[in-house]
Image (spheres, rainbow, N blue to C red):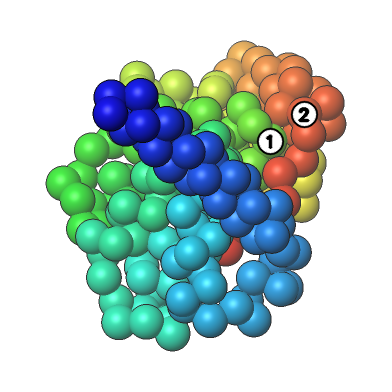
Amino acid sequence: MLLNNMNRILISIVTIFITFSTYAKECDYSATEIKQLNIQQLTLCAQSNPKHQNYLGTLYATGKRVPKNMKKAFYYFSLAAKNNFPGGMFNLGNMYRRGLGVSQNYNKAFYLFYKSAKLGYVSAQHNLGFMYGNGFGTQKNLTLSYAWFYVGMQQGYAASFHNANALLGKLSKKEFFDGIRLGKKFYLQYAIKSTKPPVSPEMI
Protein backbone atom coordinates (compact mmCIF):
# COMPACT_ATOMS: atom_id res chain seq x y z
CA MET A 1 0.00 0.00 0.00
CA LEU A 2 2.78 2.43 0.97
CA LEU A 3 4.72 1.50 -2.15
CA ASN A 4 1.69 2.19 -4.34
CA ASN A 5 1.21 5.62 -2.77
CA MET A 6 4.88 6.46 -3.32
CA ASN A 7 4.59 5.38 -6.95
CA ARG A 8 1.55 7.63 -7.43
CA ILE A 9 3.40 10.58 -5.90
CA LEU A 10 6.44 9.93 -8.10
CA ILE A 11 4.27 9.71 -11.21
CA SER A 12 2.55 12.98 -10.27
CA ILE A 13 5.89 14.76 -9.80
CA VAL A 14 7.19 13.49 -13.15
CA THR A 15 3.94 14.52 -14.86
CA ILE A 16 4.13 18.02 -13.41
CA PHE A 17 7.77 18.35 -14.49
CA ILE A 18 6.99 17.21 -18.03
CA THR A 19 3.99 19.54 -18.20
CA PHE A 20 5.98 22.60 -17.13
CA SER A 21 8.84 21.66 -19.45
CA THR A 22 6.35 21.45 -22.31
CA TYR A 23 4.86 24.84 -21.42
CA ALA A 24 8.32 26.39 -21.28
CA LYS A 25 9.16 25.04 -24.74
CA GLU A 26 5.80 25.84 -26.32
CA CYS A 27 5.74 29.34 -24.82
CA ASP A 28 9.01 30.48 -26.32
CA TYR A 29 7.34 33.13 -28.48
CA SER A 30 8.87 36.25 -29.98
CA ALA A 31 7.94 39.69 -28.59
CA THR A 32 5.50 40.17 -31.50
CA GLU A 33 3.88 36.77 -31.01
CA ILE A 34 3.43 37.32 -27.27
CA LYS A 35 1.26 40.37 -27.96
CA GLN A 36 -1.08 38.23 -30.05
CA LEU A 37 -1.78 35.71 -27.28
CA ASN A 38 -4.99 35.93 -25.28
CA ILE A 39 -4.93 36.40 -21.50
CA GLN A 40 -5.57 32.70 -20.83
CA GLN A 41 -2.58 31.71 -22.95
CA LEU A 42 -0.40 34.37 -21.32
CA THR A 43 -1.40 33.24 -17.83
CA LEU A 44 -0.63 29.63 -18.67
CA CYS A 45 2.76 30.49 -20.14
CA ALA A 46 3.53 32.79 -17.19
CA GLN A 47 3.66 29.73 -14.97
CA SER A 48 7.10 28.96 -16.34
CA ASN A 49 8.29 31.67 -18.74
CA PRO A 50 9.74 34.96 -17.39
CA LYS A 51 9.07 36.84 -20.65
CA HIS A 52 5.36 36.16 -20.21
CA GLN A 53 5.51 36.96 -16.50
CA ASN A 54 6.97 40.37 -17.31
CA TYR A 55 4.53 41.05 -20.15
CA LEU A 56 1.51 40.03 -18.07
CA GLY A 57 2.75 42.24 -15.24
CA THR A 58 2.91 45.16 -17.67
CA LEU A 59 -0.66 44.57 -18.78
CA TYR A 60 -1.92 44.59 -15.20
CA ALA A 61 0.18 47.65 -14.34
CA THR A 62 -1.15 49.69 -17.27
CA GLY A 63 -4.70 48.31 -17.47
CA LYS A 64 -4.28 47.27 -21.10
CA ARG A 65 -6.45 44.29 -22.12
CA VAL A 66 -7.17 43.56 -18.44
CA PRO A 67 -8.49 45.61 -15.49
CA LYS A 68 -5.65 47.50 -13.85
CA ASN A 69 -4.39 45.55 -10.84
CA MET A 70 -1.13 46.60 -9.19
CA LYS A 71 -1.07 43.59 -6.87
CA LYS A 72 -1.07 41.23 -9.83
CA ALA A 73 1.49 43.43 -11.60
CA PHE A 74 3.74 43.19 -8.56
CA TYR A 75 3.25 39.42 -8.43
CA TYR A 76 4.23 38.83 -12.06
CA PHE A 77 7.12 41.29 -12.03
CA SER A 78 8.41 39.56 -8.89
CA LEU A 79 8.28 36.18 -10.63
CA ALA A 80 10.17 37.54 -13.63
CA ALA A 81 12.76 39.17 -11.38
CA LYS A 82 13.30 35.94 -9.42
CA ASN A 83 13.94 34.26 -12.77
CA ASN A 84 16.68 36.85 -13.47
CA PHE A 85 14.74 38.47 -16.31
CA PRO A 86 16.21 42.00 -16.61
CA GLY A 87 12.97 43.60 -17.80
CA GLY A 88 11.13 42.17 -14.78
CA MET A 89 13.80 43.50 -12.43
CA PHE A 90 13.51 46.93 -14.03
CA ASN A 91 9.72 47.03 -13.79
CA LEU A 92 9.70 45.78 -10.21
CA GLY A 93 12.33 48.39 -9.39
CA ASN A 94 10.10 51.09 -10.84
CA MET A 95 7.22 49.95 -8.63
CA TYR A 96 9.44 50.34 -5.55
CA ARG A 97 10.91 53.63 -6.80
CA ARG A 98 7.53 55.21 -7.39
CA GLY A 99 5.55 53.44 -4.66
CA LEU A 100 3.10 51.90 -7.10
CA GLY A 101 1.03 49.18 -5.44
CA VAL A 102 3.77 48.78 -2.84
CA SER A 103 5.42 50.94 -0.20
CA GLN A 104 8.08 53.18 -1.73
CA ASN A 105 11.51 51.70 -1.12
CA TYR A 106 14.51 53.30 -2.81
CA ASN A 107 16.92 50.69 -1.46
CA LYS A 108 15.05 47.83 -3.14
CA ALA A 109 14.62 49.90 -6.30
CA PHE A 110 18.35 50.58 -6.49
CA TYR A 111 19.21 46.92 -5.91
CA LEU A 112 16.89 45.79 -8.72
CA PHE A 113 18.10 48.44 -11.16
CA TYR A 114 21.69 47.48 -10.40
CA LYS A 115 21.06 43.78 -11.06
CA SER A 116 19.22 44.57 -14.28
CA ALA A 117 21.90 47.03 -15.40
CA LYS A 118 24.63 44.43 -14.99
CA LEU A 119 22.65 42.16 -17.32
CA GLY A 120 22.87 44.85 -19.99
CA TYR A 121 19.40 46.40 -19.67
CA VAL A 122 19.79 50.00 -20.83
CA SER A 123 16.70 51.42 -19.10
CA ALA A 124 18.02 50.15 -15.77
CA GLN A 125 21.46 51.57 -16.55
CA HIS A 126 19.88 54.96 -17.12
CA ASN A 127 17.89 54.67 -13.90
CA LEU A 128 21.09 53.97 -11.96
CA GLY A 129 22.32 57.35 -13.16
CA PHE A 130 19.15 58.90 -11.81
CA MET A 131 19.44 57.09 -8.46
CA TYR A 132 23.09 58.06 -7.96
CA GLY A 133 22.37 61.63 -9.00
CA ASN A 134 19.67 62.03 -6.37
CA GLY A 135 21.04 59.79 -3.64
CA PHE A 136 18.02 57.47 -3.84
CA GLY A 137 18.79 54.06 -2.31
CA THR A 138 22.50 54.81 -2.31
CA GLN A 139 24.94 57.57 -1.42
CA LYS A 140 24.75 60.51 -3.81
CA ASN A 141 27.59 60.32 -6.31
CA LEU A 142 27.59 62.62 -9.33
CA THR A 143 30.55 60.85 -10.90
CA LEU A 144 28.73 57.51 -10.95
CA SER A 145 25.57 59.26 -12.05
CA TYR A 146 27.31 60.68 -15.11
CA ALA A 147 29.06 57.33 -15.74
CA TRP A 148 25.77 55.46 -16.04
CA PHE A 149 24.21 58.19 -18.17
CA TYR A 150 27.29 57.85 -20.38
CA VAL A 151 26.50 54.14 -20.78
CA GLY A 152 22.97 55.05 -21.81
CA MET A 153 24.18 57.69 -24.27
CA GLN A 154 26.52 55.22 -25.94
CA GLN A 155 23.49 53.06 -26.66
CA GLY A 156 21.41 55.94 -27.97
CA TYR A 157 19.10 56.19 -24.95
CA ALA A 158 17.48 59.61 -25.36
CA ALA A 159 16.75 60.30 -21.69
CA SER A 160 20.42 59.73 -20.82
CA PHE A 161 21.48 62.55 -23.15
CA HIS A 162 19.03 64.91 -21.47
CA ASN A 163 20.03 63.97 -17.92
CA ALA A 164 23.75 64.00 -18.66
CA ASN A 165 23.51 67.51 -20.14
CA ALA A 166 21.55 68.72 -17.11
CA LEU A 167 24.25 67.26 -14.86
CA LEU A 168 27.19 68.98 -16.57
CA GLY A 169 26.82 72.26 -14.70
CA LYS A 170 26.99 70.43 -11.35
CA LEU A 171 30.15 68.43 -12.06
CA SER A 172 33.68 69.45 -11.21
CA LYS A 173 36.32 68.90 -13.88
CA LYS A 174 37.57 65.82 -12.02
CA GLU A 175 34.06 64.39 -11.59
CA PHE A 176 33.41 64.88 -15.31
CA PHE A 177 36.52 63.05 -16.51
CA ASP A 178 36.17 60.34 -13.86
CA GLY A 179 32.58 59.87 -15.00
CA ILE A 180 33.67 59.39 -18.61
CA ARG A 181 36.41 56.96 -17.56
CA LEU A 182 34.02 54.88 -15.48
CA GLY A 183 31.32 55.14 -18.12
CA LYS A 184 33.63 53.63 -20.73
CA LYS A 185 34.51 50.85 -18.30
CA PHE A 186 30.84 50.10 -17.51
CA TYR A 187 29.96 50.23 -21.19
CA LEU A 188 32.55 47.59 -22.01
CA GLN A 189 31.46 45.43 -19.09
CA TYR A 190 27.71 45.72 -19.27
CA ALA A 191 26.78 46.78 -22.78
CA ILE A 192 29.18 45.38 -25.37
CA LYS A 193 30.43 42.18 -23.74
CA SER A 194 27.22 41.19 -22.01
CA THR A 195 24.51 39.22 -23.78
CA LYS A 196 21.94 41.82 -24.69
CA PRO A 197 18.52 40.97 -23.28
CA PRO A 198 15.48 41.05 -25.55
CA VAL A 199 13.52 44.28 -25.61
CA SER A 200 10.91 44.00 -22.88
CA PRO A 201 7.65 45.85 -22.36
CA GLU A 202 8.15 48.45 -19.67
CA MET A 203 5.83 49.96 -17.12
CA ILE A 204 6.58 53.68 -17.49
Q: Does the image show residue 165? A: no
**Residue 180 in the figure: left or right of residue 81:** right
**Residue 202 in the figure: left or right of residue 61:** right
In the image, 104 versus 83, the foreground residue is 83
Q: Residues within 10 Å of mark 1 (few under 14, many from 20)?
A: many
Locate residue 2, reporting x and y percent: 28, 24
Tell me the amino acid under the disc marked 1: Gly
The residue at 52%/29% (across/down) is 115
Q: Residues within 10 Å of mark 2 (few under 14, many from 20)?
A: some
**Residue 71 in the figure: left or right of residue 194:** left
Q: CA distance from mark 2 to mark 1?
A: 6 Å
Secondary structure under tag 2 reads loop
Q: Is residue 81 above or below residue 44?
A: above
**Residue 84 in the figure: left or right of residue 36:** left
The residue at 23%/60% (across/down) is 71
Residue 45's quadrant in the figure? bottom right
Query: Answer yes or no: do the residues labelled 2 and 1 have beta carbons within 8 Å?
Result: yes
Q: Which residue is mark 2?
A: 194
Q: Which residue is mark 1?
A: 120
The residue at 42%/62% (across/down) is 57
Secondary structure under tag 1 reads loop
